[in-house]
Amino acid sequence: MAKIIISYLNTLKPVILLFIVWEISSRYFFPDQSLFPPASQVFKCFCLLVSEGLLFNHVKASFLRVAAGFFLGACTGLVLGIAMGWNEVIRSNISPIISILYPIPAIGWLPLFILWIGINELLPVMIVFICAFFPMLYNTMTGVKSVDLSLVKASKMLGASEWQVLTTIVLPLALPNIFTGLKLEAGMAWRVIIAAEMVAISTGLGSLLMKGESLLRVDIIIVCLLILSLLCFCSEKIFLLIENKLTSKWRNPDA
Amino acid sequence: MPEIKVCDAKPSFVERSYSLKVDRGELRVIYGPTGSGKTTLLNIVAGLIAYEGYVFFNDVPMDCVPPQKRNIGYLFQGLHLFPHLSVFNNIAYGLKIKKIPPEKIKEQVDELMELFEITHLENRYPQNLSGGEKRRVALARTFAPRPGVLLMDEPLNSLDENIVIRLRRQFKRLQRKLILTTLYVTHDSEECIELADNIYYV
């Protein structure tokens, strides 16, 4: 336990140093503190936003959109990725369409979605859906395709049906790839939701950022950015923890 | 236990065809040099490759029966243990597929682990086993679902002499006890003489 605490403190050391340098440089080297407020002022702003419940409400709004979009996108990507990885006919038919759509950045769909579905709650959910769907599909497909076929053969010889081979051998072995997709996109979902909220939605972290900009409140902007960074980090870590829980036994049997 | 008949079976990528008859409970050794097509014969019987000709189990044609429905235990040369399953779960895999009650699975797996002297490895994963241990786990896994036909592809290849002698005896004892019709591929003449009821030269 002591070792873990020491390792966390070591990781935090550079961050603490950054805050000290920030505080000193803002106070003594920048004449206009409204454009570059010291860390202590940002902290005060953070406390104010929390006590007024403003920060919680905006984070909650963003979180619900990310959760809904991410869940739907990841599930759809997972199902289609399994189908494409497992079945050659499905893969050869759908792959060309996916190859055309995949390179389009999620935020690039925004103008089209504004026209198609209007500015409402569905808009940011759809953007996160797109953001989560394609990478999830590709990672799942790669994971399923890369499972050693001799294991599939061995499983069949032990009496497993196609469905049993898929659920007991292929999917568990594809988990590392699937989680690579989930980890990457959990962070990415927060980045795109901010962009969508900045452009078109009046609630959420992105809209709070824009309010900070229009009020010339740099401290609010910095609070939002730091919260965003923390949310991205936590989302990725949660999936890393789940992945370790599910696969570490056989991926690192010595650990 | 079925009697196996292979009649002029020929896969598209091989020049020769195979014909043989193996009696119920017989241990037939398929003997020949490396690359002579011994594994191909096993794959025909297992239904893992397409072929022309016929395969019968107890005079029932098997040519349209998929591998998982032929009630075969196949020990591959590469073993193919499932890396994400512990030794216990590897051995229990075929039994779980058949939806056998858990207490019965435990009983059967424990019995096999004891027989092959791998009880102490129960919770280990294949990546952490030695070559000999892996072979014994693979043997136990092959026997677990009580197949009617056993196909063994050089199961004791590249192992220490002492382990080979012990495993050979364990295998022969179990094969006799369960009266399993067996096709056993080897290129080792000593193994061939010790195990075979009959020999098929390739």
Image: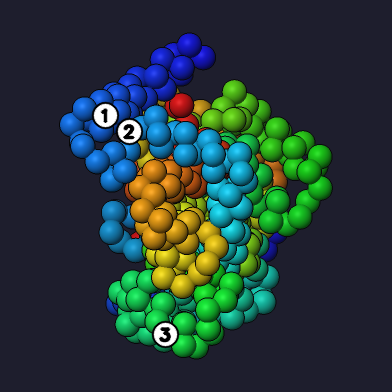
Does residue A71 appear left or right of residue A113 in this picture? right
Residue A27 numbered tag: 1
Q: Are marks 1 and 3 on the same chain?
A: yes
Instruction: Identify residue for label 3.
Output: A112
**Number of the label disc, if any, that sits on residue B91:** none
SS at badge 1: helix
- Whether the residues at callouts 2 and 1 have beta carbons within 8 Å, the answer is yes
Letter of the chain that mark 1 sits on in the rendering:
A
Subunit bearing disc 3 = A
- The amino acid type of the residue labelled 1 equals Arg
Quadrant position of the N terminus of chain B in the picture = bottom right
| SS of the residue under disc 2 | loop
Residue named by callout 2: A38
Between residues A114 and A82, which one lies in front from this camera angle?
Answer: A114
**Label 2 crowding class (10 Å Cα cut-off): few <14, some 14-19, many 20+?**
many
Tell me which residue sits at (32%, 82%) in the image. A100
Residues at discs 3 and 2 both on one chain: yes
Q: State how many labels appear.
A: 3
Question: Amino acid under label 3?
Answer: Leu
Q: CA distance from mark 3 to mark 2?
A: 40 Å
Secondary structure beneath label 3: helix
